[in-house]
């Protein structure tokens, strides 16, 4: 899952780890089977996580309620591609293949 931080430092932190500010593809494309605050049954693939804010940053970043799968999902240039659309397509294909 995309690593997001409070808005004051989001852009600089995301650039340092490779995430594109405003992407949020990893919070939309994959399914999450574990409980998410506001989504007790998890979320299906292709559905926007309720914890993704208007700037496509995770509201649960740094929060112990954030699902473990989200903690383990890191930016990967091969998976995330060159832009948000590439990331959505690649992550959706990865989801379908697993």
Image (cartoon, rainbow, N blue to C red):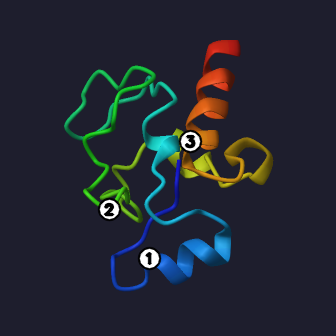
Considering depth in this image, is 49 or 67 the residue closer to the camera? 49
Q: Quadrant of the C terminus?
A: top right
Considering depth in this image, is 62 or 58 the residue closer to the camera? 58
For this view, does 44 lie left or right of residue 38? right
For the residues carrying marks 3 and 1, which lies nearer the camera in this image?
A: 3
Q: Earlier in the sequence, mark 3 or mark 1?
A: 1
Circle 3 residue: 85
Q: Residue at x 66, y 22 (%)?
A: 93
Q: Residue at x 34, y 75 (%)?
A: 6
Percent x, y of residue 61 = 40, 61
Residue at the farthest top position: 97
Circle 2 residue: 55
User: Label 1 neighbourhood size at 10 Å, few (<14), some (14-19), many (20+)?
Assistant: some
For residue 85, above or below residue 53: above
User: Label 3 neighbourhood size at 10 Å, few (<14), some (14-19), many (20+)?
Assistant: few
For this view, does 25 lie left or right of residue 17? left
For the residues carrying marks 3 and 2, which lies nearer the camera in this image?
A: 3
Q: Earlier in the sequence, mark 2 or mark 1?
A: 1
Given contact means CB atoms under 8 Å apart, are the residues at marks 2 and 1 in contact? yes
For residue 43, above or below residue 78: above
Q: Secondary structure at mark 1?
A: helix
Q: CA distance from mark 3 to mark 2?
A: 16 Å
Quarter-wise, where is residue 33 in the image? top left
Quarter-wise, where is residue 79 in the image? top right
Q: CA distance from mark 2 to mark 1?
A: 10 Å
Image disc number at residue 27 = none
Q: Residue at x 31, y 50 (%)?
A: 52
Percent x, y of residue 10 = 44, 76
Circle 1 residue: 10
Q: Earlier in the sequence, mark 3 or mark 2?
A: 2
Residue 98 in view of the camera: no
């Amino acid at each position: 899952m995309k690593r997001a931080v409070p808005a004051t430092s989001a852009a600089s932190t995301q650039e340092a780890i490779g995430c594109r500010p405003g992407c949020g593809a990893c919070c939309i494309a994959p399914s999450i089977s574990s409980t998410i605050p506001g989504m007790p049954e998890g979320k299906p693939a292709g559905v926007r996580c309720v914890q993704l804010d208007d700037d496509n940053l995770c509201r649960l970043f740094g929060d112990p309620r954030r699902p473990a799968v989200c903690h383990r999902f890191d930016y990967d240039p091969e998976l995330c591609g060159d832009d948000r659309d590439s990331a959505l397509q690649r992550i959706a294909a990865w989801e379908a293949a697993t």
